[in-house]
Image (tube, rainbow, N blue to C red):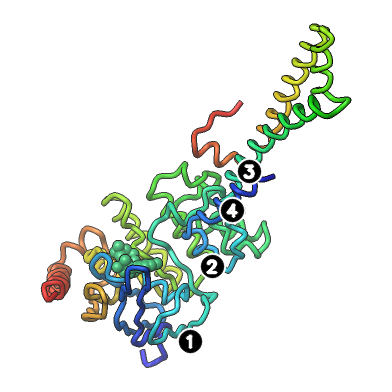
Amino acid sequence: MAETPLVRAAGIGKAYRGRRGTTQAIADIGFEQAEGEFLGVVGPSGCGKTTLLRCLAGLERPDTGSVEFDGRPVTGIPAAVSVVFQEYNRSLFPWLSALENVRFPIRDLGRTAGREQAREALRRVGLADFADHHPFQLSGGMQQRVAIARAIVSRPRFLLMDEPFASVDAQTRAVLEQLTVTITAELGLTVLLITHDIDEAIFMADRVLVLSARPSRVLREVPIDLDRPRDEVETRALPLFQDYRRAIHRLIGSSSAED
Amino acid sequence: MWPVLIAGVDATRAVEPGYLDVARVSHARPASVVLPAVLPALIAGARIALGIALIMMVISEMIAATSGLGYLILQAQRTYAIAQMYAGIIVLGLLGWLVTAAFSLVERRVLGWYQDQKGIAHG
Ligand SMILES: Nc1ncnc2c1ncn2[C@@H]1O[C@H](COP(=O)(O)OP(=O)(O)OP(=O)(O)O)[C@@H](O)[C@H]1O
Ligand SMILES: [Mg+2]
């Protein structure tokens, strides 16, 4: 682990300036993430999680601090980075079939090869039989699977996920959490998962970054020493899981009690 | 042309920012998602433009031209050639129907996804 981290954020801050004054979204966030590591980021609603993700992806420039990917400062969007956005209904293209949506990031590959690769990605998320369906013909959970397939189709090195399961029901959520952990482990992906669900972060991640309320900073980094492969039922029932859960809830609770 | 242009500009401004983000992280040109996104609005604009064009054509023929369908209908009316007048009107109706049908066919081809999504019946 002495190697250089894949992702390094140092002192990043970002404010939004509007007619009604300035909103400081994130104050001072720094962390490092090793290649292959699954990092969870939790924080209260509106604390600037999406803003952080946009800075890491290169979609937005932070006002202060810097982001490095693979040893280079992030100025544009690195080619090896892909994103699953918070709302699938605003990120899947309604005019394309599931297959063509998934093929979009690799559209320069050529039709035949691209389709083959897109089909392979759809297979991984269990949607091989729905390639020709349009997003509106799929359930919410299925649409999010398409979004995940699209994010892995180009074989990225770094996958950013912004509350990917926030708008699906609890059962689907559990299934998708398991699926995501399995796929990203198979592909050896480095993942940063943003969520406001503490249990989800503990279940999926190797380490959890706990953010404070807005303007956010890192309250603590909590390494999660739970064995893999993890199981939705068994792992969550472990006393250690409950300990992590309690600790992180307390952290967030005490931070919002301060203001 | 105006209804198309106005509809196009309006729709471009309202394109889902999420689509643009996806284009950016996929290293695609913004136009590759803006065009399909505004197509329904463009076509709705074109439909209106088409109706206006047809009406304008006939009216201008009635007023200013010495040939054409509008001229024929008006001329027949003035000379009490009632049968001929109705024939002209029927041809005009048929023409309108034909143009609309052709238009719907094109619309169905390029906007099938949109119609299915909105549950628009098509015939
Ligand atoms: N484009 C913008 N313009 C102005 N203010 C913004 C913009 N985007 C976010 N903000 C503000 O910045 C703060 C953080 O927003 P952000 O979306 O990053 O939070 P979040 O933690 O992702 O929230 P949620 O949990 O609801 O997804 C909020 O107070 C929000 O009002
Ligand atoms: Mg958010």
Q: Nearer the viewer, mark 1 or mark 4?
A: 4
Q: CA distance from mark 3 to mark 4?
A: 10 Å
Q: CA distance from mark 1 to mark 4?
A: 37 Å
- Residue type at tag 1: Pro
- Label 4 element class: helix
| x and y, in percent, of residue B7 in the image | 59, 47
Dividing the picture into quarters, in which one does residue A232 lie?
bottom left
- Label 3 element class: helix
User: Dot 4, crowdedness within 10 Å: few (<14), some or many (≥20)?
Assistant: few
> Which residue is the site of mark 3?
B3
Asked if the residues shown at circle 3 and circle 4 are in contact, with their CB atoms under 8 angstroms apart, the answer is no
> Which residue is the site of mark 1?
A73
- Label 1 element class: strand
- Residue type at tag 3: Pro
- Residue type at tag 4: Val
Q: Nearer the viewer, mark 3 or mark 1?
A: 3
Q: Residue at x 41, y 86 (%)?
A: A66
Left or right of A37? Residue A42 is left
Q: Nearer the viewer, residue A183 or B52?
A: B52
Q: Which mark is residue A15?
A: none
Q: Residue at x 57, y 59 (%)?
A: A104
B11 shown above or below A218: above
Q: Chain of mark 3?
A: B
Say yes or no: labels 2 and 4 on the same chain.
yes
| x and y, in percent, of residue B60 in the image | 78, 30
Q: Residue at x 68, y 61 (%)?
A: A110
